[in-house]
Image (tube, rainbow, N blue to C red):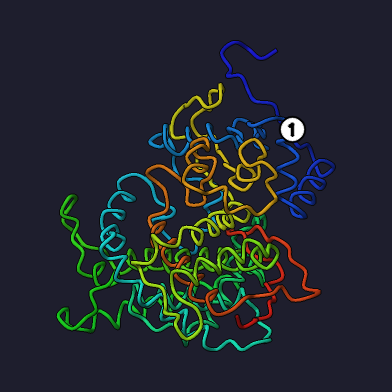
Amino acid sequence: MQPAHEPRLPPGPPVRRGLRDAIPFFLGFARDPLGFVGGRFSSYGDVYFVPSQRPGEPGLYVLRHPDHLHAVLVTHAAKMRKEHSAFEQLSRVVGEGLLTTDGEVWRRQRRLLQPAFAQARLATYAATMTREAARVRSGFTDGQSLELSREMMELTLRVVCQTLFSHDASNDTDDVSRAMVVLQDTVSRPDLLPKWLPTPGRRRFRRSVEAIDRIVYRMIRERRAESPEAAPQDLLQSMIAAVDSEGDGAGLSEREMRDQLVTLFLAGHETTSHALTWTFYLLSQNPSAERALHEELDRVLGRGREARLPTFEDLPQLPYTEMVLKESMRIYPPVYLLARRAAEDVEIGGYVIPKGSELVLWVYLTHHDARWFPEPEAFRPERFTPEAEASLPKNAYVPFGAGPRACIGKTFAMIEARLLLATIAQSFRLEHAEGHRVAMNPRVTLNPKHGMKMVARAR
C-alpha cells in the first residue's frame, strides 16, 4: 500500500528493468506505436501511468478521454508547459518558435503573428490558393500516375510561401522535401548516444537544418533589402516591421524571425499536405462520399465548360467539402498526439498529477474511440453535420489542438484545404494505384509510410 502522503497513481505497466524489459517495449512501440498505445489503453483504461526509469523523477501520464484532453488543453492550460521531452529534438529544428515556447515569450510571439491570420487577411489569400491548385491540376492528364503525397507537399509549400512570405518556392521544393524526410525520422527517434559522437544520422540532420536555414535566411535578407514602401504587405513584412506595443516595444531579431518562419514554413504546409493526401485516398475508397462531393462541387461551381474556380465566398456553400476534410482528419489526424509538462500539481481524471510530470494526449486514439465515433474506422463525413458535431463531447475531435495553445493557423489551413480539394476534385477523380501499400507513419506528423500512388481520372 502507498503511504498516505503519496498521490494515487493510475494503473499502468511496471518499471522496465534491464534489457529484458526494455527490448520488447522498444520493438513493440517502434513497430506500431498506435497499436501499442491503443493496447495499453485497452488494458489500463482512459488514463495510464508509465513510471520514470530514473529514480526520483516524475513519470508519464497517458490520456485519451475528451474530458481529460479538455482539462489539459483548456481548463488547466495555464498550468501546462511545452517543456516536454517530445519537443527536445523538435526544438533543434524550429528553435524558440511559436510551437515550442511558453509564457511571456510565447504570448509576445502570438501577439506579433496574430494579425497575419485575421479573418480579413485570410480572405485575401484565397485567390493564390486556388490559382496554385489550378496550376497543379492543369498538369494532370487522364490516366496519369501520380505520387500524390509529393504533389500535395509541393502545392502546399508554394501556397504557404506565396501567401505568407510572397516567395516563389518552385526552386526550393526538392531541398525541402529531402530535408523533411530526414527531420521527421530524426526528431521522432530517441537519441541515446553521447552528444559528442558525430554519427551519420546527426550529420544528415545538421545538413537538413542548414538547407532549411539557407532558404529562410535568404527570404529575410532579401526582404530587408527592399524598401518598406515597395515590399509586399505579407506576414514576413509584418514581422520585419513588428513592434510589440503591448510589451517592451521591441521588434523581432533575425534569429527570432528565423524561428517563427521555420515553424510556419514547416508546420504551415506539411500538415495540410498530409490532410489532403489522406482525403483523396479515403475518397478513392468510398465512392458514395466521392459522388456526394462531386455533386456539391458541380452544383455550386458548375460542370465542364461552365465550371469556374472556387472562391473564398463559395466556402459557405460547400459544407460537404468541409465535412469530408473533417472526417479525413478524424481518421488520419496529421497531428496525432499532443504533449505537455505540468508546471504545478494538477488534478485530472481523479488523479493528482505532480509538478514536473509529462503528459501525452493521444489524439489519434481519441478520434478512433467507438464511444464518440461508432464504427470509428468507417469514413462517414455525415459525422460532421452541424447537429452531429454539436452532440460530440468537448474535445472528442481536436485535429488542431484546443484552448489558448490551439494552432494559430487553423482557419488558414481549413480555407486552404477546402479550396485545394475543391479545385482538384472538380476536374479529376484520383484512384488508388493497384498494388500500392498504404500504411501510416507516425513521426512528427502522421504521414503515409510509402507515399501515396494514385491515378488521375478526368471527370
Tell me which residue sits at (76%, 37%) in the image. 16
Q: Report the front residue among 247 and 68.
A: 68
Tell me which residue sits at (57%, 65%) in the image. 274
Q: Is residue 435 above or below residue 336?
A: below
What is the x, y in percent for residue 65?
A: 59, 34
Tell me which residue sits at (71%, 43%) in the image. 37
Which residue is farthest top? 4
What is the x, y in percent for residue 226?
A: 21, 84
Corner quadrant of residue 219? bottom left
Q: Say which element carries label 1.
A: loop
Corner quadrant of residue 188? bottom right
Q: Which residue is mark 1?
A: 13
What is the x, y in percent for residue 362?
A: 60, 44
Q: Quadrant of the N terminus?
A: top right
Q: Report the front residue among 232 and 184.
A: 232
Identify the amino acid type marked 1: Pro
Which residue is farthest right? 20
Q: Is residue 66 above or below residue 419?
A: above
- For label 1, the crowd category at 10 Å Cα-Cα, with few meaning under 14, some 14 to 19 and many 20 or more, is few
Q: Is residue 109 left or right of residue 80?
A: left
What is the total number of numbered labels drawn onto the structure image? Answer: 1
Tell me which residue sits at (53%, 38%) in the image. 392
Corner quadrant of residue 148? bottom right
Q: Is residue 199 left or right of residue 126?
A: right
